[in-house]
Amino acid sequence: VIFNNRKYPKHLGLEHRKFSDIDAIKLKDAFMKGLGFVNEETDVLNDKTAEEIQAKITEVSKEDYRHRDCVVIAFMGYGEHNLVWAKDRPVGIQVLLEPLKGDMCHPSLVGKPKIIILQTDNPDFVETFNADGDDELEKTIKKRHVIPTEADFIYLGSEMPGLITNRDAMQGSIFISHLAKNIKELGTSTETR
């Protein structure tokens, strides 16, 4: 599931994330070509509220995973540290992912990787640059299990405290571009399965 939050209500003071659709297309393509996901399993959900995101993750966590190898959830939007911005408000990543924990999810998902991808732009500063090299800084605003409940989570993220997220006006974000490229190139190799 790819949560692609691009547009926010004006009263929040957060600008439109111009390149987010490029990233969503690249990720979906990488999931399908590199990881073997089918179109019906790869939802791109645009501009969802915190409640809608939580409901979808809960739905995903209750599905039967006996014939699946993992679950992948990508958040693209504004965020920082341990928060991501839904369309209506910021919400803690741990709160959103609670339904995926081993004591909350479908028994067939326990022990399988939960890959979490965070392409979050700090709402205070986002660095963008054009392909021609001109840089521009843009201000934007219950069962018990043997394994620990989060032992099978993998977190990937673009935003680190104190650093600026890089984006390319023609190619989307650097993080998603490289991630999608590597998934497509290496996703079907025996070393990654």
Image (cartoon, helix red, strand yellow):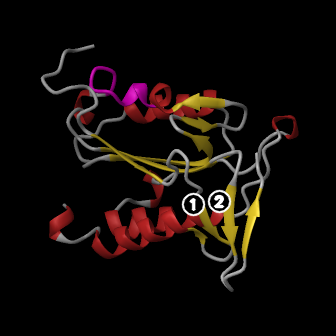
Please say whether residue 3 is visible from this viewpoint.
no
The answer to whether mark 2 and mark 1 are in CB contact below 8 A is: yes
Query: In the orientation shown, which residue stands out farthest toward the bottom?
Result: 132
Report whether 69 appears left or right of 4.
left
Q: Residue at x 48, y 25 (%)?
A: 95
Residue 160 painted magenta: no
Of tags 2 and 1, the one toward the viewer is: 2
Q: Position of residue 112 (x, y in %)?
A: 23, 41
Local secondary structure at mark 2: helix
Q: Position of residue 135 (x, y in %)?
A: 71, 74
User: Against 168, is 127 above or below?
Assistant: above
User: Against 91, is 28 above or below?
Assistant: below
Label ID, residue 1: none
Label 2 sits on residue? 20
Residues shaded magenta: 97-105
- Label 2 environment density (alpha carbons within 10 Å; few <14, some 14–19, many ≥20): many
Label 1 sits on residue? 24
C-alpha separation, residue under disc 2 versus residue under disc 1: 6 Å
Q: Nearer the viewer, residue 191 or 69?
A: 191
Q: Amino acid at mark 1?
A: Ala
Query: In the orientation shown, which residue stands out farthest toward the front?
Result: 162
